Image (tube, rainbow, N blue to C red):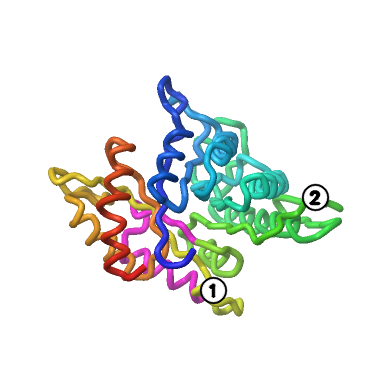
Amino acid sequence: MAGLGFGVSINASAAPGADPAAEARHAEELGFDLVTLTDHLPGTRPTHETWTLLTWLAAATERIQVGTNVLGLPYRHPAVTAKMAASLDRLSGGRLVLGLGAGGSNAEFEAFGLPVRQPGEKVDAFEEALGIIHGLWTEDDFDYRGRHYHVHDATIEPKPDREIPVWLGVYGRRALGIAGRLAQGWIPSMRFAPPERWKRLRDVVRRAAEEANRNPDDITYAYNVAVRVDPNAQPREHVVAGPAEKVAEQLTTLAAIGITFLNLWPAGDPAEQRERMASEVIPAVRSTIGS
């Protein structure tokens, strides 16, 4: 995307009255570049399964990109993920952003009887998974044998007709190195990586890209930020809040440290917050930075 991009998180609620497709269409009408969904499957709160809902959102919209933020690796075998992503990207006209995570919610995976790996094993499995996904997207009769995953003489058709952007939601040094070497984007959250830490982690990604002979400026440096546009809102930890001009000022400051994509999480009434972000905040940010 040229200039600073803006996405918005959509609630995956399956509660009575919830309409995620209408939320996605609203975001598209307001001019957002991307809608994203989280990937937390177990629990008592009614939600839709992430990939099924993402496909529904893609079919309900025409222009806006759709993305996962982020798929938990243990939920789906990487070879299956590769096929799913190739299909959805083609059916949506090239609008998929495939966000992937190594799997941080151990209790969720244990609840589903899925592998619960140690931190180092998670990174190893993550790198293997990315190797399989990229291999299936680009090769025929693909063989891969790792410690955690393997495929044998595997081919998927049709293959993607473009490079599907893969954004990684990672924080550890080894995983950041994988992002720099292999991914098209990096998408941490303010809650876990406040701005000063974000800059230090971003530098790890950039160094890894340079060491892999990649241009680090080709990577999308995204950031999940909770936002509440409200003149009466009080500042809260990990939430950008306040009147529109103050929110715009804070988001402009984030862009100035090297963030190239802001994925906004409405903190408050989602429809109202989307409208205020789109009409009062985003234009002011883009005007200030010349994007």
When asked about the image quadrant of residue 258, the answer is bottom left
- Between disc 2 and disc 1, whose residue precedes? 2
Q: For mark 1, what is the residue?
A: 208
| Residue kind at label 2, given as amino acid type | Glu
Name the one closer to the observer, 266 or 209: 266
**In the current view of this chain or complex, which residue is farthest to the left?**
232
How many dots with numbers? Answer: 2
Residue 15 rendering spot, x and y as whole percentages: 43, 23
By secondary structure, the bulk of the magenta-drawn segment is best described as: helix
When asked about the image quadrant of residue 262, the answer is bottom left
Q: Residue at x 33, y 70 (%)?
A: 290
Q: For mark 2, what is the residue?
A: 157
Name the one closer to the observer, 194 or 16: 16
Dot 1 alpha-carbon crowd within 10 angstroms: few under 14, some 14 to 19, many 20 or more: many
Residue 197 rendering spot, x and y as whole percentages: 35, 64
Name the one closer to the observer, 127 or 288: 288
Residue 176 relative to residue 55: left or right: left
Q: Secondary structure at mark 2?
A: loop
Q: Which residues are magenta?
A: 186-209
Q: Is residue 113 above or below residue 123?
A: above
